[in-house]
Image (cartoon, rainbow, N blue to C red):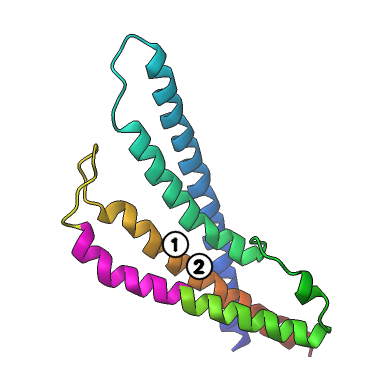
Amino acid sequence: MTIVLRYYLKFLYYLDIVVKWFCTFVAGLMAAVVLLQVVSRYLPIPTPPWTEELARYLMIYMAFIGTSTGIRKWNNISVDFLLMKLPPKIYRIVLMLMQIVILCLVTYLGILGLRVFPRVGLRQLSATMGFPMLVPQSAIVIGCFLMALQLVGVLLQPIVKEENRV
């Protein structure tokens, strides 16, 4: 069992590297698109109408997919003032319960997206770019899937560390 968990955690490590590179690429692309939009306003050429919409969709992809990296490191924004006052054993239990609740919410959101987005997203078209809205909506499903994978890894990490101590 330990070998499977180690391979799963190693897979998550490499998946996180891919996600970081993807987000870096998307951030650069988004910066280029916004720069094109700003520069084209001051030039005597027509401003491309699709730049604002593309930048928005790139930001959505970067946010949803990049969140899995924050979950892996468990450094998301949170108020843990009260949690830090708890005894260590109760703190670990409350933290694990929070992670399980978040895993359930992310899984539910991903499943809901899988059910709703294909029906709705294929009928709606992007305002200026003309592609189906399923393309930007799929960022939510992909991001939820990646977040769920990383949350399972966060939940399993103490088990692997405990087995290594024995």
Q: Amino acid at mark 2?
A: Met
Q: Is residue 156 visible in the rendered structure shown here? A: yes
Name, please, the residue furthest toward the left: 123
**Residue 147's disc number:** 2
Name, please, the residue furthest toward the top: 44
Q: Is residue 7 visible in the rendered structure shown here? A: no
The residue under the point 30% across, 25% down is 48
Tag 2's secondary structure?
Answer: helix
* Horizontal and vertical percent position of residue 110: 38, 70
* Horizontal and vertical percent position of residue 93: 70, 86
Would residue 119 be counted in the magenta stretch? yes
Would residue 17 be counted in the magenta stretch? no
- Considering only vertical position in the picture, is 54 above or below 156? above
Residues 117 and 27: in front is 117
| Range drawn in magenta | 106-121
Q: Residues within 10 Å of mark 1 (few under 14, many from 20)?
A: many
Give how far apart the Cα atoms at labels 1 and 2 are: 6 Å
Q: Residues within 10 Å of mark 2 (few under 14, many from 20)?
A: many
**Residue 20's disc number:** none
The residue under the point 52% across, 77% down is 103
The residue under the point 38% across, 45% down is 57
Q: Amino acid at mark 1?
A: Gly
Identify the image quadrant of the N terminus: bottom right
Q: Which residue is mark 1?
A: 143
